[in-house]
Image: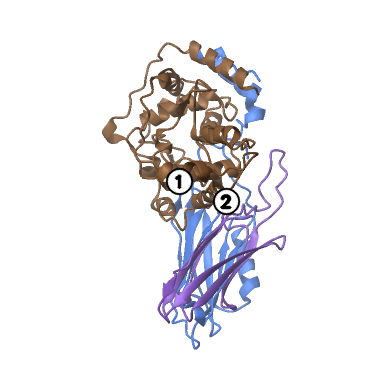
Chain colours: A blue, B brown, C purple
Amino acid sequence: MERTRPKTHLLRATRREFLRAVGRVAGGIGLISVVTVRPTSATPDTMNKAIRGVIGEAPVRTGKITLDVPALVENGNAIPLSVSVDSPMTEAAYVRRVHVFNEKNPQPYVATFHFSPRSGRAKVSTRIRLADSQKLVAIAELSDGSFWSDSVDVVVTLAACLEEPR
Amino acid sequence: MSVAADRLVAGGFFLLFAFSVALAAEIPRGERRSGYAFMGRETQAMQDDRTTNPGMLWVLEGEAMWDRKEGAAKRSCAQCHGNAAKSMKGVAARYPAFDAKLHWPVDLAQRINICRTARQRASPLAYESKELLALTAYVAAQSQGSKIAPPSDKRLTPFRSAGRDFFNLRQGQLNLSCAQCHDDNWRGRLAGSAITQAHPTGYPLYRLEWQTMGSLQRRMRNCLIGMRAEPFEYGAPNYVALELYMMWRARGLPMDSPAVRP
Amino acid sequence: MARALVNVPTRAKRGQVIEIKALISHPMETGYRPDINGKPYPRDIINKFICTYNSTEVFRADLHPAISANPFLSFFTVATESGTLTLTWTDDGGQLYVEKANIIVE
């Protein structure tokens, strides 16, 4: 394996040299990809359909549940997400499940968390991936059959220099 | 990819840049900050909490490997080095170091492989493999909090100089040098991401962009590709020379491996 | 062999609400990530997590590809009695990863 550094870097590349170099190597290093986003195909409509598919036609109110996600994230691969529901978590009144949905990932589901009176506190933290800036929705299903929701708009910044073409 | 060919090329490279290139202004000592300071609160929290830091998965793996008998010699790291918390404390903070047999500086991962082949008589671990990252992470974690202390070994001087020259070299299709971003523009942003000062205080680290643990060499390759320059093969002495300079540039800053970075 | 990092308090008072943190190494391959030829890597994720407390299920999570690689979960449970918490992760291939942690409740 011979690796010699080409001499052109010692001189300031002329515009012509630069464009020629771009043309030569563009295919290999993916120079052409200026704006790359990860695959997205879901839409707000898909998310709403998914929500209805999971909770049926029941009315959903805002309140009781808090979805905690930073408004601006440095990297879409590991976004801290915390969801908590204001509930005594007793046999008489507890949270059954919390569903989390997203708007623009290839598919709208994030997770479903199942609780019981043994949980003590209806609070979960995890880390999620978002393909692009989008809305997240969390829906709590209480033991009395009521549904409550919260939503957050998250702005996702992508890495400036990518390691490989995507 | 023979070691001899690598050396020949690197030697030629050093000769080519024996003369100092005009240097960008070095960051004043008092203004130096690790990449940690440039991250958002949430990413910092991910690093700080050892129960949630994903890099700890590799440190734990390395801890298990430390006691494992390996190779034809059926020897574990522990048999020679004992308790890693004692014997490895401060080690990562003073690497790369000069290897007398090779007459060349080596980084921590290469040092681990030299031990594996020479002492354990086992095959070397592949670069960026889970095992090599785990063992390197375990050793580097023992230096957490230790101040980076480049050795004053005079044999390292020509390599460190070559590393400095490379850092200041404009290269690639974008004709950028490391110094232009990391010495001159570290207060700025590049397309929404903070430009850090590029101090290798936390390696090996968990990079959110990679969704896994990675070495400093992987990060350097990432930068070279970003600059549209040809990256060297893993293990190339050019990376070690650059790391030598970067560690000198970061002297006195505390190590924080396993770090988390965006 | 997936490495896991589990955090359960070793001791608790009866009735105390304790936090459990669980981190496991897994690529959580979404099935949408394209390789160098544009063909997506096949999906391979942990899709279920269950925590039992002396054999009673106390927490469960259904996970989808939107969960990050090396998935992290933190949840709560009431310290009812001394015993063992068993954490089980299941992936798409049906493989189980199991970690246990003991707790003394006084």
Q: Between residues B113 and A23, which one lies in front from this camera angle?
A: B113
Q: Quadrant of the N terminus of chain B?
A: top right
Q: Looking at the picture, does residue B227 appear above or below residue B143?
A: above
Point out residue B2 in the picture as x, y percentages from the top left corner.
64, 22
Mark 1 residue type? Ala
CA distance separating discs 2 and 1:
41 Å
Point out residue C38 in the picture as x, y percentages from the top left corner.
71, 41
Q: Between residues B159 and B191, which one lies in front from this camera angle?
A: B159
Label at residue B84: 1
Q: Between residues B175 and C24, which one lies in front from this camera angle?
A: C24
Q: Looking at the picture, does residue C30 appear above or below residue B32?
A: below
> Can residue C11 be spotted in the picture?
yes
Label at residue A131: 2
- Of badges 2 and 1, the one in the foreground is 1
Report the residue at 52% width, 28% height from top: B227
A68 lies left or right of C87: left
Mark 2 residue type? Ala
The count of marks equals 2
State which chain disc 1 sits on: B
Report the residue at 50% width, 41% height from top: B80
B68 lies left or right of B177: right
Tell me the SS state at disc 1: helix
